[in-house]
Amino acid sequence: MERKKITAVDCTIRDGGLMNNSQFDLAMVRAAFKACCDAGIDYCELGYRNSKDMFDPAEFGPWRFCDEHDLVAATEGIDRRNTKIALMMDAHKSRPEDLLPANESVVDLIRVATYVKDKNLAIRLENHAKELGYETAINIMAISHAHMPDLEVFLNDVEVETQAEVINIVDSFGSMYMDQLHYMISKFHMHLKTKAVGVHFHNNQQLAFANTMEGIIHGATWADATMNGLGRGAGNCPLELLISFLKNPDLDILPVLECIGEHVIPLKKSIAWGYHIPYMITGILNQHPLPAIKWMKDPDNTDYLKFYAEVDDG
Amino acid sequence: MERKKITAVDCTIRDGGLMNNSQFDLAMVRAAFKACCDAGIDYCELGYRNSKDMFDPAEFGPWRFCDEHDLVAATEGIDRRNTKIALMMDAHKSRPEDLLPANESVVDLIRVATYVKDKNLAIRLENHAKELGYETAINIMAISHAHMPDLEVFLNDVEVETQAEVINIVDSFGSMYMDQLHYMISKFHMHLKTKAVGVHFHNNQQLAFANTMEGIIHGATWADATMNGLGRGAGNCPLELLISFLKNPDLDILPVLECIGEHVIPLKKSIAWGYHIPYMITGILNQHPLPAIKWMKDPDNTDYLKFYAEVDDG
């Protein structure tokens, strides 16, 4: 079955930037953008536009802020074909005034990332971006920790108070099994009558791709992925696997494979993403990956019993 | 939901041995066996009993042959609790006369691995092992390449002509999606009225664990897994993820994590198992992983377009 209507979002630079303070060099960002364009990916998310009040530009690279001139440098001269540019703004770490009107920006889509508790910040930021002329999305992070009644109120409010094109289920901790996803996605469909549902998974239990497929089979029409799964902790759904699954003749896996070989694999020397036991442990315990990311600073420390005992609050 | 009735088979040493000519040192094999016993795993598969006429003992380690004295060395002094010992015999690479009567052996379960075309060799070998007093299983390899009518005849004959406890679906190429698994498992259930169905997956598309869960949800009652996924090419369903999923209070993840930290992770320096782009490519193309395994001898060769062109016969 061909799945033409799935909107694919590459977030290699954005989610991968959580592992290196968004310190990708320009050549890598241009290569990733070009690969997305050549591969037929719908959106390429080039980073965050977060606040310089909250992230020190001496510590964080340009893709944490995505100033317009950096975005121009990353994309000019590349044939965009049908690929649009997305940015993420954390609801609690962004300033609305950092957004230009859409017709003065190269950005097409603003994705507001939020926890359930920051609902009103998120809705206000989405409304602002929409007024400026952007397409908008809301990504509900750490959804495996949400109180379901609060989440249902959130979904209802988002349906009524925003014009976001898509609301994304974000399994930040990589803890979700397929039956939990079925439950979650049914709640999304119940409340979101006028919006698409998207999915964003992490690979702590090697389920990011499987859950993405399962989400699509159950009605999600937007899907996030990253090249070779580059992303926070265990990483994300690999874009190459998603393309292979979708069987969409407008998508081409080869530019993605080329970019992975030339630009992503070399990062393995400095960034420990992908399936590793510490990430697996926080995933099965439904916990934030931060302790695992810290532990992985010394990948030779394989005393997993110690790590398990440290993070297991059960 | 607790899944008490799932029979878990660890095949770390057996499947991992396909990556190092079964050259594990004795300390590693003893540690893996002890971890299985302590974790409550039902069967620990310690290797192959294949023919020394077909595998040169100068080239292949003891776990390709599993002579009884080596099995005794690997297991003596370890409290087996409820863990039984399994061996694999390739139907086309084994000699029936290499099997002792079960009551003179430490082995409990003989698993006959076969291609569909070697059906009659497999049935004869299974019958022989059963007559000698062993539990028996048949693993149908490379099942994604089987002609379905031939496979159905095989299943029917296995049902009528053997007393095997379990017949295993083996996705050797890691090419199977969940809907293909659903189709396959329904055929197994249709023909195998008196036998259990088991599953053995490879991780070329990061689906080994997901498909194992999906197989269990659809009625498989035996599941293969390996520690940290150690196995041929992209490896297998990680045992630690399977244990976490099963929620069986008789299983304990900690001995497995300890063994992974002390014995499995150090092998990463010499064995390139796990998700890598060349394995992914043979997986999505439904091909044998051998070209990818050869390519991975030089992991710094990331010219994936060249590899894709070499193996793509489409």
Image (cartoon, coloured by chain):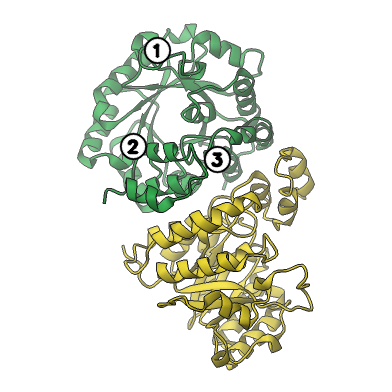
Chain colours: A green, B yellow
List the residue tagged with mark 3.
A238
Q: Is residue A72 above or below residue B48?
A: above
- Judging from the image, mark 3 belongs to the subunit labelled A
Residue at screen point 27% across, 33% down: A155
Three-letter amino acid code at the position of disc 2: Ala
Quarter of the rendering containing residue A74? top right
Image location of residue A98, percent across then percent down: 39, 10
Three-letter amino acid code at the position of disc 3: Pro
Tell me which numbered mark, 3 or 1, is placed earlier along the sequence.
1
- Specify whether B247 is left or right of A24: left
- Specify whether B76 is left or right of B81: right
List the residue tagged with mark 2.
A142
Residue at screen point 53% across, 69% down: B30
Can residue A159 be seen here? yes
Give A93 or B254, whichever is nearer the viewer: B254
Can residue A175 be seen here? no
Three-letter amino acid code at the position of disc 1: Lys
Q: Is residue A77 above or below residue B206?
A: above
Image location of residue A224, percent across then percent down: 48, 35
Q: Tag 2's secondary structure?
A: loop
Q: Tag 1's secondary structure?
A: loop
Please count the marks in the image: 3
